[in-house]
DNA sequence: CGAAAAAGATGATGGCAATCATATTAATAG
DNA sequence: CTATTAATATGATTGCCATCATCTTTTTCG
């Protein structure tokens, strides 16, 4: 090979990285191959040396975005006490910063609806990352793993729906109200659950 | 005027109606003017006699879809006892039918992310309909209107996020699991709220 | 240093889209 | 029945986009 060993890999990674931002900002169809390449400091011609098709880049960029998001969040909460982790995840997800910067935020609410309309292959890639996200979230709920998974699913749904609604509303008072309602609700549900568990245990003890 | 009085209005309505389905199915940018007109049995030329621009049609079609959805739901719950209404709304929203037929479902999870990227005018139209939806939902929560509004916002966010996630997951077991988790969580939350209110009232009585 | 090979650039090509100018059709008033 | 006029159709026009064939540059190995 004539170019240095890592040269192509670096370029490839740069394209994916830039694309992951622009696609989240402008939508899965909101930006063309030529502009995507220009973002990475290249011209459009070399594109097909790196990707089979535009769609393949979308999948790679999405995977990259999700992996990065999840890894960063894991790092952040590792430094916190276990009982503070859930609140941190929810607070950062439902922050004005996240709402106003879709390009560096979660790809699910930004691209999910568009991807749900794509072919099975693309959709499966999304579904796999959604599962990763659920697993990370479920780890923050103590107790029965099945219950934790259910709580994690509902919490993520609320968080994604809240971000979606707040982005539709723009960035004023109403939008902030949405963020607060979502945040409070997810955390109150988490606080309520141990009680429910204790009640269930009590009930079980009574019948025994 | 030479054509019958209602002729143009009928045609206009037919275009909007068909567009409201196709846009929800294929996305705000997923279908062109020519195909949209063909859906209504016309050719592309007459389009600009009816709409200033493609974007104007998107807004009209979206408004139509939301008004229809809300009106239909209001009709359905009017026949039910008040305490059954919330469950009906949640159950139908988080049904496999709704998940699998975005063309006839809520326009928010189908088009929300794309619209959040449009100009202020389009976004404001969306935000107004979102407010209608919140109001309908808030009516189903008894008690303090402010609390009801907050509950309605969180419930809708959970519902939209759940539909989004379930559409990404496709239509298998995992997708069904998402629907159930969303449904249970929203309804358990509603059941729990009166308890919280009683506790607050007790506390207020104590301080008085 | 020169040849080889890979990375990237240039420049079609063909398709599709939105918009608009102009022609045609249909309905009604006189 | 004919002239008028509004509704719709035909057919550009312009621009963008994904894809690909071919050319150029860059790097390293012999």
Image: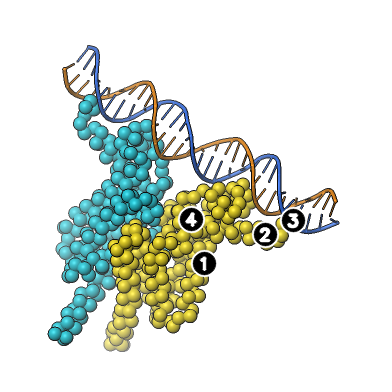
Chain colours: A cyan, B yellow, C blue, D orange
Q: Which residue is mark 4?
A: B23
Q: Nearer the viewer, mark 1 or mark 2?
A: 2
Number of other residues with Cα within 10 Å of mark 4, as a class: few under 14, some 14 to 19, many 20 or more = many
Mark 3 and mark 1 residues within 8 Å of each other at the beta carbon = no
Q: Are marks 2 and 3 on the same chain?
A: yes
Percent x, y of residue B109: 41, 60
Give the alpha-carbon distance from disc 4 to disc 3, as whole Å: 32 Å
Q: Chain of mark 2?
A: B
| Location of residue B162 with respect to C5 vertically, above or below | below
Give me the residue at 34% from left, 61% from top: B171
Labels 1 and 2: the sequence-earlier one? 2
Identify the secondary structure beneath mark 4: helix
Q: Which residue is mark 1?
A: B68
| Location of residue B184 with respect to C16 vertically, above or below | below
Q: Is residue A147 visible?
A: yes
Give the alpha-carbon distance from disc 2 to disc 4, as whole Å: 24 Å
Number of other residues with Cα within 10 Å of mark 1, as a class: few under 14, some 14 to 19, many 20 or more = some
Left/right of residue C15 with respect to residue B143 in the rendered view: right
Give me the residue at 32% from left, 49% from top: A121
Number of other residues with Cα within 10 Å of mark 3, as a class: few under 14, some 14 to 19, many 20 or more = few
> What is the tally of numbered marks visible in this picture?
4
Left/right of residue B191 with respect to residue D8 in the rendered view: left
Q: Which residue is mark 2?
A: B7
Q: Are marks 1 and 2 on the same chain?
A: yes
Give the alpha-carbon distance from disc 1 to disc 2, as whole Å: 22 Å
Q: Residue B6 falls in which quadrant of the image?
A: bottom right
Percent x, y of residue A11: 28, 35
Give the alpha-carbon distance from disc 3 to disc 1, as whole Å: 31 Å
Q: Is A155 in front, or is B44? A: B44
Q: Are marks 2 and 4 on the same chain?
A: yes
Q: Chain of mark 4?
A: B
């Amino acid at each position: 090979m004539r170019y240095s060993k890592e040269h192509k890999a670096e370029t490839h990674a740069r394209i994916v990285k830039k694309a992951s931002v622009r696609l989240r900002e402008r939508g899965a169809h909101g930006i063309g191959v030529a502009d995507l390449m220009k973002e990475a400091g290249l011209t459009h011609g070399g594109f097909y040396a790196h990707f089979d098709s535009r769609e393949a880049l979308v999948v790679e960029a999405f995977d990259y975005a999700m992996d990065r998001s999840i890894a960063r969040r894991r790092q952040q909460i590792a430094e916190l006490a276990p009982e503070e982790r859930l609140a941190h995840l929810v607070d950062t997800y439902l922050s004005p910063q996240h709402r106003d910067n879709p390009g560096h935020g979660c790809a699910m609410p930004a691209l999910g609806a568009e991807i749900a309309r794509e072919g099975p292959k693309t959709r499966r890639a999304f579904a796999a990352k959604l599962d990763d996200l659920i697993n990370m979230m479920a780890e923050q709920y103590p107790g029965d793993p099945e219950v934790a998974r259910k709580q994690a699913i509902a919490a993520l749904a609320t968080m994604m729906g809240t971000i979606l609604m707040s982005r539709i509303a723009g960035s004023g008072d109403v939008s902030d109200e949405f963020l607060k309602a979502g945040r409070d609700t997810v955390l109150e549900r988490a606080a309520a659950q141990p009680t429910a568990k204790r009640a269930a245990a009590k009930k079980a003890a009574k019948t025994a």
